[in-house]
Image (cartoon, rainbow, N blue to C red):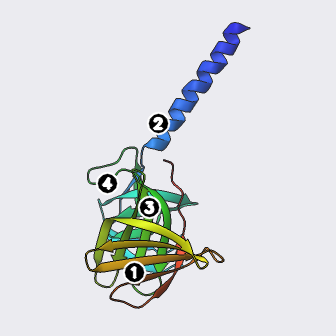
Amino acid sequence: MKLKTLAVALFSAAAAVSLSVSTALAQVAEVSIDLLNVRSGPGTNFAVRGTIPQGTQAKIIQTQGLWLYIVTGPIEGWVYSAYVTVLDQPGPGVEAPITTVMVCNGTNRTTARVYRQNGELKLRVHDRLDNLTWLDTPARMDTSAGATSYVNIRGEQTTRVLQSQSSPTNCSIQTSNRPLETGVVTEIEQPQ
């Protein structure tokens, strides 16, 4: 009986180690067609945000059915899984996984991602019109007046991302040189 209990305990421990190792590795998608559309949602009925060429590697953040939410450079969004090869290990130039708190996809030109990296809250802003990206900017969180506000300050550029507490799928982005832009929240959970 003791031998059977020991075998079960060892098997459980091995399974736990295997699970923690597999979730620790970030999966990477490599584009296998000439140009791959990156969309704002998991389906062909969603708008195309941009395209990425064959051979490009992107970090997989989330899966939904046959669709993958990927991040590569300034482009992030949904791609159809049949057009990529999923690699077991991160390839060159692909960052280690980070925990995403919230993504605010602005309706006009801006996308903002709030995330935690090594325990620090950070904000990434991408201007789709000018193709500019601000990365790894420390941020602070304020909760008041029915909204959660994420604020970063980088030189003269101040960015504020607000998420409504009463309607968590609604958000807005405001930078010091542009008017308020409404958007839609995408919350992404990722193993730490």
Q: Which residue is mark 3?
A: 115
Q: Quadrant of the N terminus?
A: top right
Sequence-wise first label, 3 or 1: 1
Residue 118 in the image: state x and y as whole percent: 39, 50
Query: What label does residue 162 carry, if any?
Result: none
Give me the C-alpha separation between circle 1 and circle 4.
Answer: 23 Å
| Rendered residue at 30%/61% (across/down) | 56
- Give the mark nearer the N terminus: 3 vs 4: 4
Local secondary structure at mark 4: loop
Kind of residue at disc 1: Thr
For this rendering, which residue is in front, 81 or 106? 106
Q: Residue at x 46, y 74 (%)?
A: 39
From the viewer's perspective, is the residue at label 1 or at label 4 nearer?
1
Q: Amino acid at mark 3?
A: Tyr
Residue 189 placement, left or right of 134: right
Q: Secondary structure at mark 3?
A: strand
Which residue is label 4 attached to? 94
- Horizontally, is 176 left or right of 42 in the view? left
* Foreground label between 3 and 1: 3
Q: Which mark is residue 110?
A: 1
